[in-house]
């Protein structure tokens, strides 16, 4: 699948649960990014633990990888790190369409892009109202986005 002229490596499968269709997706590039981010946090956590662990309690990024080993001391919990690793690059879509899983991901990603653009008006200049040629694409984009939701 391509996204902004770069290849994206998705895996997807359909799961039915309580009569609802879910598509479990994995983006390999995001999985690698998640793993690198976690490795960076754990390395910083190890450095911080070497200095003393009192300051760690207020940091939620660090706290999620800690376990209490005594009343006032913490250690890195490898089980928590391993548990989080299982979800690297994973996202889930719920749909009622009959699209194959990869087509559903593509539609979702396209719709998400349209929503992101419409939520950030500062990044888009307003259309020139004196010309219908500049207004028409905005209307078509909005119609396409709303028809996919329906």
Image (spheres, rainbow, N blue to C red):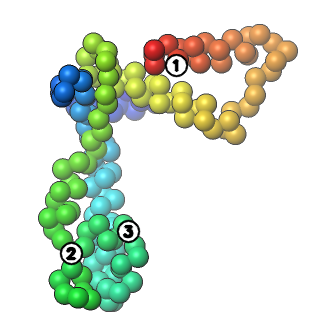
Q: How far apart are marks 3 and 2 (CA)?
A: 13 Å
Earlier along the polypeptide chain: callout 3 or callout 2?
Answer: 3
The N terminus - image quarter: top left
Pointer 3 local density, CA inside 10 Å: few below 14, some 14–19, many at least 20: few
Residue at the image position 50 percent from the left and 30 percent from the top: 113
Q: Name the residue under label 2.
A: 67
The label number, if any, that marks residue 60 in the structure image: 3
Residue 103 occupies quadrant = top left
The label number, if any, that marks residue 42 in the structure image: none
Residue at the image position 27 percent from the left and 41 percent from the top: 90
Q: Is residue 23 visible?
A: yes
Residue at the image position 33 percent from the left and 66 percent from the top: 40
Decide if residue 97 is on the left or right side of residue 127: left
Residue 81 spot, x, y in % from top left? 20, 62
Q: What element carries label 2?
A: strand
Q: Distance between the residues labelled 3 and 1?
A: 36 Å
Q: Is mark 1 on a helix, strand or loop?
A: helix
Q: What element carries label 3?
A: helix
Residue 38 spot, x, y in % from top left? 29, 61
Decide if residue 139 is on the left or right side of residue 125: left
The label number, if any, that marks residue 145 in the structure image: 1
Pointer 2 local density, CA inside 10 Å: few below 14, some 14–19, many at least 20: some
């Amino acid at each position: 699948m391509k996204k902004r002229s770069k290849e994206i490596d998705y895996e997807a499968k359909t799961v039915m649960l309580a009569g609802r269709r879910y598509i479990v997706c994995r983006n390999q590039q995001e999985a690698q990014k998640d793993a690198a981010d976690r490795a960076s946090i754990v390395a910083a956590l190890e450095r911080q633990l070497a200095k003393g662990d009192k300051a760690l309690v207020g940091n939620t990024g660090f706290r999620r990888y800690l376990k209490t080993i005594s009343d006032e001391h913490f250690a890195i919990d490898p089980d928590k790190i391993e548990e989080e690793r299982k979800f690297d690059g994973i996202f889930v879509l719920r749909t009622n369409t009959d699209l194959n899983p990869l087509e559903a991901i593509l539609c979702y990603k396209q719709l998400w892009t349209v929503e992101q653009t419409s939520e950030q008006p500062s990044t888009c200049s307003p259309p020139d109202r004196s010309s219908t040629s500049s207004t028409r694409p905005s209307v078509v984009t909005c119609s396409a986005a709303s028809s996919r939701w329906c």
